Image (cartoon, helix red, strand yellow):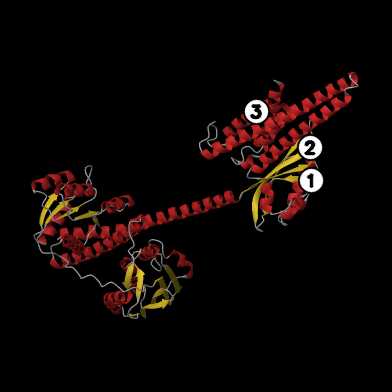
Amino acid sequence: MKIYAIALAIVLAAAILRLGFLLDLGLNAPFVTFYPAVMLAALYGGLRAGAVATVSSALIADYFWIEPVGALIPVSMQDWVVLSLFVITNILVSCIAENLQKANIKLQDKENNQKKELENQVYERTSELEKQIIERKHAEESLAESENRFRTLANAIPQLAFIAHADGHVHWYNERWYQYTGETPESMEGWGWKSVHHPDVLPAVMERWLTSIATRNPFDMTFPLRGADGQFRPFLTRVMPLLDSEGRVMEWFGTNTELSEQISMENDLRKAKVEAERANLAKSKFLAAVSHDLRQPVQSLVLLLEVLKTHRDGSKVTKAIEAMGGALNGLNDLLKGTLDISRIDAGVVTVELCSVDVRAMLKRLSVEYAPLSERKGLKFRYFCKAGRHAHTDGAILERIIRNLVENAIRYTNRGGLLIGVRPRGDRMRIEIVDTGIGIPADKIGEIYEEFFQVGNPARDHRLGLGLGLAIVRRCARLLDVELQVRSNEGRGTRFTILLPLDGSVPVAPAPSIKTRIAGGARIMIIEDNPKIRTGFQMLLECWDYEVFCAETGEISLTVGEQEGWRFDAIIADHRLGAGMSGTETAAEIRRRAKRPIPTLIVTGDTSPERIEEVHASGFEMLHKPVAPDALARRMAILLQAAG
């Protein structure tokens, strides 16, 4: 029982040492003090003492320093592996110590027997002496084998390891040390290890190491070591003394554990935290701006509606209606811009790369924006040689150029703007240059944030909503093109888009379709909001469509069965209360009709999950509020494709 008590005492001392002096390690290196403890117990009491020390050390380390803390069962496979290696390693060490003890005892017994036999049998002295020599040789071989096992174990661990004499003279390194440093045993003998230390840190390392030698205290320090490639990497170094029975240091056992991966993970975690805080702040600003900008047109609509209720004068009613139209346009622009950002962030906007005729695009935009520029007294010019084709998504590129042109016109009061296109190697350079108010140098990094505007602290909607450049940056990322900006405050701004050239033969544009198709088509409307449902019905009937309405998906199935599923198209809201969704209802109608009826989902839901659901269904989608022209055009496309 004595050896077990001593083994447990050694383990307890190792645990107290860890808890009292190595708190800064946290959950790292849970067994750092227990390896020496098990070795001491095994050297003192053999295999049984070593086994007791191993099991008790594993339980204590698992309870205090392996996740989850306070439990005896690790969660991760990595922790199981580490714990198993600890147990197996120390059982092997205990076996080695047991063999050493048995060998020594056996040797002593043999020597005693030989002495007695030599005293009693003089004639047999020669033969007994030969026998003793043979047995001694076997014992030395056994000891050498045990030492070889220990060295093999030390070479198997991932850390750098070394052993030093009591005076600090290092006389052994494991193979990992030589692999990392690229040095030789001759160059590292004694104090040669100083050559792989950074000269700025070496004095502090020497001071701490000499202090440990003098006080016989463990050494613990983090410092860089030079690798064979010449690069310095951080290592956590721990050195424990092996004491004899009188407390004198016999040898020092040390390990160096590389911390590069751990430090990299900590840096990544800090960066992620900063990015999360930045995103949270941006979200708060975004919501505050949306709340403010939504209130303005709604307030004007409330007041103007009261005007319509209380006045019958034709001129006042006309002015009120015009003002309401302007407020609705502003509200629609805000919702449309917010929706565009939501769709891009949700990852549902797909990029379709093809050959895009940039000159034709600029010519079309010039027809649209030149009159707007002239009304402000600005010159609108563009130059692009014929045959300039880019390999990109034409719709997304046009959205980028439109937003930049509209910003240029909005913030330019004199001079004008210019769009230029030039080839640069295998890329095309599109520049939008204006002579507007410019951007302060300290605000360049903020212009792509939602609702940020230069020179509009009062948020005058005539100067836009502050969403255009946020959409531009997202679109540029979608296309994976480079977006540059240069600006001089008070003199103007230059935006540059760099995108790949396309050398293929451009595809001829598809013929235009009619905005509306003559009546006769049978349309099923599925909408739970009665006012919106009535609006759709009245509008489509004005276009001479035959309209069937249903409030829920279940009711639409009843109507469909009554009409023999003879519908030419379906218009459905996505969220229809507690019953079937719009996509589920349309899919069921198509299944029962046994044909792919063209379907348009019209929804006010902008959450990424709902948007992804609609896209996954394969149906066309528009977001509320939908302009009549946009609805008519989309219906024409659906019906023309089906017919």
**CA gap, disc 3 and disc 2:** 23 Å
Residue type at mark 3?
Answer: Ala
Closer-to-camera residue (440/641)? 641
Query: Are the residues tagged 1 and 2 within 8 Å (C-beta)?
Result: no
Closer-to-camera residue (50/458)? 50
- Please state if 145 lies on the left or on the right of 325 as rendered: right
Question: From the image, which quarter does the C terminus lie in?
Answer: bottom left
- Please state if 317 lies on the left or on the right of 616 as rendered: left
Looking at the image, tell me whether mark 3 or mark 2 is earlier in sequence order: 3
Closer-to-camera residue (108/46)? 108
- Please state if 532 lies on the left or on the right of 353 as rendered: left
Q: Position of residue 184 (x, y in %)?
A: 73, 52
**CA gap, disc 1 and disc 3:** 32 Å
Q: Which mark is residue 51?
A: 3
Can the viewer see residue 13 in this picture? no
Residue that carries the numbered disc 1 in the rendered image: 169
Residue that carries the numbered disc 2 in the rendered image: 250
